[in-house]
Image (tube, rainbow, N blue to C red):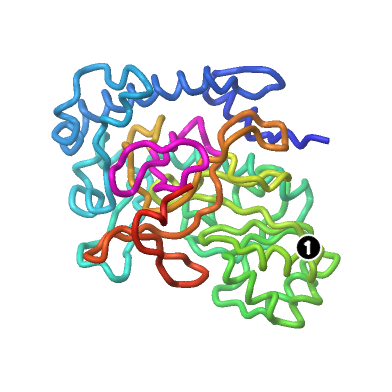
Amino acid sequence: MTFFPSLDAWVAERSGVSGPNGAPDPAALAAWQLAALRATLAWAREKSPFYRNHLASLPPNFPRTPEEVAQIPFTTPDDLREAGEHMLCVPQGAVARVVTISTSGTTGGPKRIFLTDEDVAATLDFFSQGMTMLARPGDAVLVLLPGRTPDGASDLLARATARMGARPLFAPEGCSPAETARLLIDAGISCVAALPRQAAALMADPSARQAGKGRVRTMLLSGEPVADELRAAVADAWGAEIFAHYGQTETGFGGGVECLAHQGYHLREADLFFEIVDPESGLPLGQNALGEVVVSTLLRRGMPLIRFRTGDAARMLAGPCACGSPLRRLGAVQGRIVRDAAGTRIIQPEKGAGRRGRPSFDP
Protein backbone atom coordinates (compact mmCIF):
# COMPACT_ATOMS: atom_id res chain seq x y z
CA MET A 1 0.00 0.00 0.00
CA THR A 2 1.31 3.46 -0.85
CA PHE A 3 0.54 6.77 0.78
CA PHE A 4 1.17 9.21 -2.03
CA PRO A 5 1.58 12.62 -0.40
CA SER A 6 -0.65 15.47 -1.49
CA LEU A 7 2.44 17.66 -1.15
CA ASP A 8 3.79 16.28 -4.45
CA ALA A 9 0.64 17.36 -6.27
CA TRP A 10 0.98 20.79 -4.66
CA VAL A 11 4.61 21.06 -5.80
CA ALA A 12 3.55 20.06 -9.31
CA GLU A 13 0.78 22.66 -9.41
CA ARG A 14 2.92 25.45 -7.95
CA SER A 15 5.92 24.76 -10.19
CA GLY A 16 3.97 23.85 -13.31
CA VAL A 17 6.04 20.66 -13.60
CA SER A 18 3.99 17.49 -14.02
CA GLY A 19 4.75 13.80 -14.15
CA PRO A 20 3.25 10.35 -13.53
CA ASN A 21 0.62 9.98 -10.78
CA GLY A 22 0.44 13.71 -10.21
CA ALA A 23 4.00 14.04 -8.90
CA PRO A 24 6.57 16.20 -10.72
CA ASP A 25 9.21 14.40 -12.75
CA PRO A 26 12.39 14.79 -10.63
CA ALA A 27 14.62 15.76 -13.57
CA ALA A 28 12.09 18.27 -14.90
CA LEU A 29 11.63 19.72 -11.41
CA ALA A 30 15.41 20.09 -11.01
CA ALA A 31 15.56 21.98 -14.32
CA TRP A 32 12.70 24.24 -13.20
CA GLN A 33 14.48 24.92 -9.90
CA LEU A 34 17.68 25.87 -11.72
CA ALA A 35 15.76 28.34 -13.90
CA ALA A 36 13.95 29.74 -10.84
CA LEU A 37 17.25 30.14 -8.99
CA ARG A 38 18.73 31.92 -12.02
CA ALA A 39 15.76 34.30 -12.08
CA THR A 40 16.14 34.91 -8.33
CA LEU A 41 19.80 35.87 -8.75
CA ALA A 42 18.96 38.26 -11.58
CA TRP A 43 16.18 39.87 -9.52
CA ALA A 44 18.32 40.16 -6.39
CA ARG A 45 21.25 41.72 -8.24
CA GLU A 46 18.96 44.27 -9.84
CA LYS A 47 16.95 45.22 -6.75
CA SER A 48 19.09 44.63 -3.63
CA PRO A 49 22.18 46.70 -2.68
CA PHE A 50 23.55 43.77 -0.69
CA TYR A 51 23.18 41.20 -3.46
CA ARG A 52 24.44 43.62 -6.12
CA ASN A 53 27.76 43.63 -4.31
CA HIS A 54 27.62 40.05 -2.97
CA LEU A 55 27.06 38.51 -6.42
CA ALA A 56 29.16 40.98 -8.43
CA SER A 57 31.72 38.36 -9.46
CA LEU A 58 29.15 36.17 -11.23
CA PRO A 59 28.37 36.52 -14.95
CA PRO A 60 24.84 37.27 -16.21
CA ASN A 61 22.33 34.41 -16.55
CA PHE A 62 23.97 32.43 -13.78
CA PRO A 63 23.85 29.55 -12.87
CA ARG A 64 23.49 27.85 -16.25
CA THR A 65 24.19 24.30 -15.05
CA PRO A 66 23.66 22.45 -11.75
CA GLU A 67 27.43 22.34 -11.27
CA GLU A 68 27.64 26.14 -11.34
CA VAL A 69 25.38 26.45 -8.30
CA ALA A 70 28.39 25.66 -6.09
CA GLN A 71 30.11 28.83 -7.38
CA ILE A 72 27.41 31.10 -5.93
CA PRO A 73 28.60 32.71 -2.67
CA PHE A 74 26.86 31.61 0.52
CA THR A 75 24.81 33.95 2.66
CA THR A 76 25.04 33.54 6.41
CA PRO A 77 23.24 34.50 9.62
CA ASP A 78 25.86 37.26 10.01
CA ASP A 79 24.77 38.68 6.65
CA LEU A 80 21.20 38.86 7.95
CA ARG A 81 22.36 40.64 11.09
CA GLU A 82 24.67 43.08 9.33
CA ALA A 83 22.96 43.73 5.99
CA GLY A 84 19.32 43.49 7.08
CA GLU A 85 17.26 45.93 5.08
CA HIS A 86 19.93 46.10 2.34
CA MET A 87 18.92 42.56 1.35
CA LEU A 88 15.40 43.78 0.55
CA CYS A 89 14.34 43.85 -3.10
CA VAL A 90 11.06 45.71 -2.58
CA PRO A 91 10.07 48.98 -0.88
CA GLN A 92 9.38 48.83 2.86
CA GLY A 93 5.72 49.45 2.11
CA ALA A 94 5.50 46.07 0.39
CA VAL A 95 6.59 44.24 3.56
CA ALA A 96 3.69 42.59 5.39
CA ARG A 97 5.60 41.17 8.36
CA VAL A 98 9.01 41.60 9.97
CA VAL A 99 10.25 38.74 12.15
CA THR A 100 13.04 39.56 14.58
CA ILE A 101 15.22 36.66 15.75
CA SER A 102 17.30 37.29 18.85
CA THR A 103 19.81 34.50 19.48
CA SER A 104 21.44 34.12 22.87
CA GLY A 105 25.20 33.74 22.92
CA THR A 106 25.90 35.87 19.85
CA THR A 107 27.78 39.15 19.92
CA GLY A 108 25.92 40.64 16.96
CA GLY A 109 22.47 42.13 16.84
CA PRO A 110 19.23 40.31 16.05
CA LYS A 111 18.36 38.98 12.62
CA ARG A 112 15.37 40.49 10.83
CA ILE A 113 13.39 38.61 8.19
CA PHE A 114 11.09 40.60 5.91
CA LEU A 115 8.06 38.80 4.46
CA THR A 116 5.57 40.03 1.86
CA ASP A 117 1.91 39.07 1.59
CA GLU A 118 2.91 36.58 -1.11
CA ASP A 119 5.48 34.94 1.20
CA VAL A 120 2.90 34.58 3.96
CA ALA A 121 0.34 33.14 1.53
CA ALA A 122 2.86 30.56 0.27
CA THR A 123 3.55 29.34 3.80
CA LEU A 124 -0.17 29.17 4.56
CA ASP A 125 -0.61 27.06 1.43
CA PHE A 126 2.21 24.70 2.42
CA PHE A 127 0.87 24.28 5.96
CA SER A 128 -2.60 23.48 4.58
CA GLN A 129 -1.15 20.69 2.46
CA GLY A 130 0.86 19.26 5.35
CA MET A 131 -2.07 19.24 7.75
CA THR A 132 -4.16 17.06 5.44
CA MET A 133 -2.06 14.11 6.63
CA LEU A 134 -2.73 14.85 10.31
CA ALA A 135 -6.29 16.11 10.58
CA ARG A 136 -9.68 15.60 8.97
CA PRO A 137 -12.50 18.09 8.44
CA GLY A 138 -14.22 18.61 11.78
CA ASP A 139 -11.25 17.50 13.90
CA ALA A 140 -10.24 19.65 16.88
CA VAL A 141 -6.54 20.59 16.70
CA LEU A 142 -4.76 21.87 19.81
CA VAL A 143 -1.88 24.27 19.08
CA LEU A 144 0.74 24.46 21.84
CA LEU A 145 3.46 25.98 19.64
CA PRO A 146 4.74 29.53 20.23
CA GLY A 147 4.64 32.28 17.58
CA ARG A 148 1.00 33.36 17.86
CA THR A 149 1.33 36.93 16.63
CA PRO A 150 -0.48 37.70 13.35
CA ASP A 151 1.22 35.85 10.47
CA GLY A 152 3.49 34.06 12.94
CA ALA A 153 4.16 30.34 12.59
CA SER A 154 1.42 29.20 14.97
CA ASP A 155 -1.08 31.73 13.62
CA LEU A 156 -0.46 30.47 10.07
CA LEU A 157 -0.74 26.85 11.21
CA ALA A 158 -4.09 27.56 12.87
CA ARG A 159 -5.38 29.36 9.78
CA ALA A 160 -4.17 26.51 7.56
CA THR A 161 -5.96 24.04 9.82
CA ALA A 162 -9.20 26.01 9.57
CA ARG A 163 -8.80 26.26 5.81
CA MET A 164 -8.87 22.48 5.42
CA GLY A 165 -11.98 22.18 7.59
CA ALA A 166 -10.58 21.35 11.04
CA ARG A 167 -11.06 23.43 14.22
CA PRO A 168 -7.88 24.97 15.67
CA LEU A 169 -7.68 25.80 19.38
CA PHE A 170 -4.81 27.69 21.02
CA ALA A 171 -3.81 26.49 24.47
CA PRO A 172 -3.25 29.36 26.93
CA GLU A 173 0.35 30.57 27.12
CA GLY A 174 2.26 28.58 29.73
CA CYS A 175 -0.43 25.91 29.87
CA SER A 176 0.68 23.14 32.25
CA PRO A 177 0.48 19.45 31.31
CA ALA A 178 -2.42 19.02 33.74
CA GLU A 179 -4.29 21.96 32.18
CA THR A 180 -3.55 20.56 28.73
CA ALA A 181 -5.02 17.23 29.83
CA ARG A 182 -8.28 18.98 30.68
CA LEU A 183 -8.30 20.68 27.26
CA LEU A 184 -7.77 17.36 25.50
CA ILE A 185 -10.91 16.00 27.15
CA ASP A 186 -13.14 19.08 27.13
CA ALA A 187 -12.44 20.04 23.50
CA GLY A 188 -12.26 16.50 22.15
CA ILE A 189 -8.80 17.05 20.71
CA SER A 190 -7.66 14.55 18.07
CA CYS A 191 -4.49 16.32 16.87
CA VAL A 192 -1.83 18.26 18.81
CA ALA A 193 0.83 20.62 17.39
CA ALA A 194 3.73 21.17 19.78
CA LEU A 195 7.44 21.46 20.37
CA PRO A 196 9.09 18.12 21.17
CA ARG A 197 9.88 19.38 24.68
CA GLN A 198 6.18 20.12 25.20
CA ALA A 199 5.29 16.62 24.02
CA ALA A 200 7.87 15.15 26.39
CA ALA A 201 6.35 17.11 29.29
CA LEU A 202 2.92 15.68 28.45
CA MET A 203 4.33 12.16 28.41
CA ALA A 204 5.81 12.75 31.87
CA ASP A 205 2.42 13.76 33.32
CA PRO A 206 0.03 10.92 34.32
CA SER A 207 -3.11 12.99 33.75
CA ALA A 208 -2.00 14.03 30.26
CA ARG A 209 -1.03 10.49 29.34
CA GLN A 210 -4.46 9.27 30.38
CA ALA A 211 -6.38 12.16 28.77
CA GLY A 212 -4.92 11.61 25.32
CA LYS A 213 -5.23 7.83 25.31
CA GLY A 214 -7.52 6.70 22.50
CA ARG A 215 -8.40 10.34 21.81
CA VAL A 216 -5.37 12.00 20.17
CA ARG A 217 -4.58 10.34 16.83
CA THR A 218 -1.72 12.52 15.55
CA MET A 219 0.91 15.00 16.72
CA LEU A 220 2.78 17.57 14.65
CA LEU A 221 6.17 18.25 16.23
CA SER A 222 8.37 21.12 15.07
CA GLY A 223 11.17 23.41 16.20
CA GLU A 224 13.51 20.73 17.57
CA PRO A 225 14.76 17.25 16.61
CA VAL A 226 12.32 14.46 17.45
CA ALA A 227 13.85 11.55 19.38
CA ASP A 228 12.79 7.99 18.59
CA GLU A 229 12.10 7.52 22.32
CA LEU A 230 9.52 10.31 22.19
CA ARG A 231 7.77 8.73 19.21
CA ALA A 232 7.60 5.44 21.09
CA ALA A 233 6.31 7.12 24.27
CA VAL A 234 3.51 8.92 22.41
CA ALA A 235 2.54 5.74 20.56
CA ASP A 236 2.51 3.76 23.81
CA ALA A 237 0.58 6.31 25.89
CA TRP A 238 -1.89 7.66 23.34
CA GLY A 239 -1.70 5.32 20.36
CA ALA A 240 -0.91 8.47 18.38
CA GLU A 241 1.36 8.96 15.38
CA ILE A 242 3.99 11.71 15.32
CA PHE A 243 4.68 13.72 12.17
CA ALA A 244 7.86 15.79 12.33
CA HIS A 245 8.16 19.13 10.53
CA TYR A 246 11.37 20.88 9.45
CA GLY A 247 11.61 24.61 8.92
CA GLN A 248 13.22 27.85 9.99
CA THR A 249 12.03 31.40 10.37
CA GLU A 250 14.48 32.36 7.63
CA THR A 251 12.71 30.09 5.14
CA GLY A 252 9.28 31.51 5.94
CA PHE A 253 8.66 28.88 8.65
CA GLY A 254 7.79 25.90 6.45
CA GLY A 255 10.44 23.63 4.95
CA GLY A 256 9.46 19.97 4.94
CA VAL A 257 7.18 17.46 6.63
CA GLU A 258 7.01 13.70 7.09
CA CYS A 259 4.46 11.53 5.30
CA LEU A 260 2.83 8.38 6.65
CA ALA A 261 5.94 6.35 5.81
CA HIS A 262 8.09 8.50 8.16
CA GLN A 263 11.18 8.22 5.97
CA GLY A 264 12.42 11.79 6.04
CA TYR A 265 11.02 15.23 5.30
CA HIS A 266 9.18 15.78 2.03
CA LEU A 267 10.44 19.18 0.97
CA ARG A 268 8.78 22.39 -0.10
CA GLU A 269 10.52 22.06 -3.46
CA ALA A 270 8.41 24.61 -5.35
CA ASP A 271 9.54 27.41 -3.03
CA LEU A 272 12.91 26.26 -1.68
CA PHE A 273 16.04 24.66 -3.15
CA PHE A 274 17.97 22.51 -0.69
CA GLU A 275 21.62 21.47 -0.81
CA ILE A 276 23.91 19.52 1.51
CA VAL A 277 27.48 20.85 1.61
CA ASP A 278 30.68 20.00 3.43
CA PRO A 279 30.67 22.32 6.48
CA GLU A 280 34.37 23.10 6.07
CA SER A 281 35.03 23.22 2.33
CA GLY A 282 31.53 24.30 1.27
CA LEU A 283 31.59 21.76 -1.56
CA PRO A 284 28.38 19.86 -2.40
CA LEU A 285 27.96 16.38 -0.95
CA GLY A 286 26.20 13.35 -2.41
CA GLN A 287 23.19 11.47 -1.13
CA ASN A 288 23.38 10.05 2.40
CA ALA A 289 26.46 12.17 3.24
CA LEU A 290 26.10 14.17 6.45
CA GLY A 291 26.71 17.87 5.96
CA GLU A 292 25.26 21.34 6.36
CA VAL A 293 21.79 22.16 5.04
CA VAL A 294 21.91 25.11 2.63
CA VAL A 295 18.69 26.62 1.31
CA SER A 296 17.78 29.11 -1.41
CA THR A 297 14.37 30.70 -1.88
CA LEU A 298 13.04 30.30 -5.42
CA LEU A 299 9.97 32.53 -5.65
CA ARG A 300 10.47 35.03 -2.85
CA ARG A 301 10.78 38.55 -4.22
CA GLY A 302 10.77 40.65 -1.04
CA MET A 303 13.88 39.31 0.70
CA PRO A 304 15.40 36.41 -1.23
CA LEU A 305 17.84 34.12 0.55
CA ILE A 306 20.50 32.71 -1.75
CA ARG A 307 22.50 29.69 -0.55
CA PHE A 308 21.78 30.42 3.10
CA ARG A 309 23.82 28.34 5.54
CA THR A 310 21.30 27.08 8.08
CA GLY A 311 23.78 25.54 10.53
CA ASP A 312 21.72 22.32 10.57
CA ALA A 313 23.47 18.99 10.02
CA ALA A 314 21.50 16.47 7.97
CA ARG A 315 21.58 14.15 4.96
CA MET A 316 19.73 14.13 1.65
CA LEU A 317 18.35 10.60 1.60
CA ALA A 318 18.91 8.27 -1.32
CA GLY A 319 16.15 6.54 -3.25
CA PRO A 320 12.38 7.06 -3.39
CA CYS A 321 10.17 7.15 -0.32
CA ALA A 322 8.06 4.12 0.55
CA CYS A 323 5.01 6.38 0.14
CA GLY A 324 5.59 6.41 -3.61
CA SER A 325 6.99 9.92 -3.97
CA PRO A 326 9.95 10.14 -6.35
CA LEU A 327 11.10 13.51 -4.98
CA ARG A 328 14.00 14.22 -2.66
CA ARG A 329 13.76 13.83 1.11
CA LEU A 330 15.80 15.41 3.87
CA GLY A 331 16.86 13.17 6.72
CA ALA A 332 16.48 14.00 10.39
CA VAL A 333 18.59 16.88 11.72
CA GLN A 334 21.54 15.38 13.58
CA GLY A 335 22.56 18.56 15.38
CA ARG A 336 23.88 22.08 14.95
CA ILE A 337 27.15 22.91 13.21
CA VAL A 338 29.48 25.06 15.28
CA ARG A 339 32.62 26.81 14.04
CA ASP A 340 35.03 28.18 16.62
CA ALA A 341 38.66 27.98 17.74
CA ALA A 342 38.22 24.26 18.43
CA GLY A 343 37.29 23.60 14.80
CA THR A 344 34.11 22.59 13.02
CA ARG A 345 31.88 20.09 14.79
CA ILE A 346 28.30 19.01 15.41
CA ILE A 347 26.58 19.77 18.70
CA GLN A 348 24.09 16.96 19.22
CA PRO A 349 20.89 18.25 20.84
CA GLU A 350 19.95 15.09 22.70
CA LYS A 351 23.31 14.67 24.36
CA GLY A 352 24.47 18.27 24.38
CA ALA A 353 27.99 17.25 23.34
CA GLY A 354 29.85 17.75 20.12
CA ARG A 355 31.92 15.37 18.07
CA ARG A 356 35.11 17.00 16.90
CA GLY A 357 36.86 16.87 13.55
CA ARG A 358 36.10 15.68 10.05
CA PRO A 359 34.73 12.26 11.06
CA SER A 360 31.60 14.08 12.28
CA PHE A 361 30.61 14.61 8.65
CA ASP A 362 31.36 11.19 7.22
CA PRO A 363 28.38 9.32 5.70
In which quadrant of the rendered view does residue 308 lie?
top left
Q: Position of residue 219 (x, y in %)?
A: 69, 59
Dot 1 corresponds to which residue? Answer: 216
Say if 9 sits above or below 223 in the image: above
Q: Is residue 19 left or right of residue 1?
A: left
Q: Position of residue 191 (x, y in %)?
A: 73, 58
Residue visible at 52% across and 42% down in the picture: 288
Asked whether 352 or 85 is in front, the reply is 352
Q: Residue at x 77, y 47 (%)?
A: 136
Residue 127 falls left or right of residue 5 = left
Magenta span: 267-295
Q: Tell whether position 54 is magenta.
A: no
Circle 1 Cα neighbour tier, 10 Å, few/some/many (<14 / 14–19 / ≥20):
many
The amino acid type of the residue labelled 1 equals Val
Q: Residue furthest right?
A: 214
Rendered-image quadrant of the N terminus: top right
Q: Nearer the viewer, residue 301 or 330?
A: 330
Q: Is residue 289 magenta?
A: yes
* Rendered residue at 56%/23% (across/down): 26
Which one is in front, 165 or 250? 250
Q: Residue furthest front?
A: 359
Q: Give the image location of residue 241, x and y in percent.
A: 74, 57
Kindly identify the residue that appears in the image at 44 percent across and 24 percent down. Answer: 33
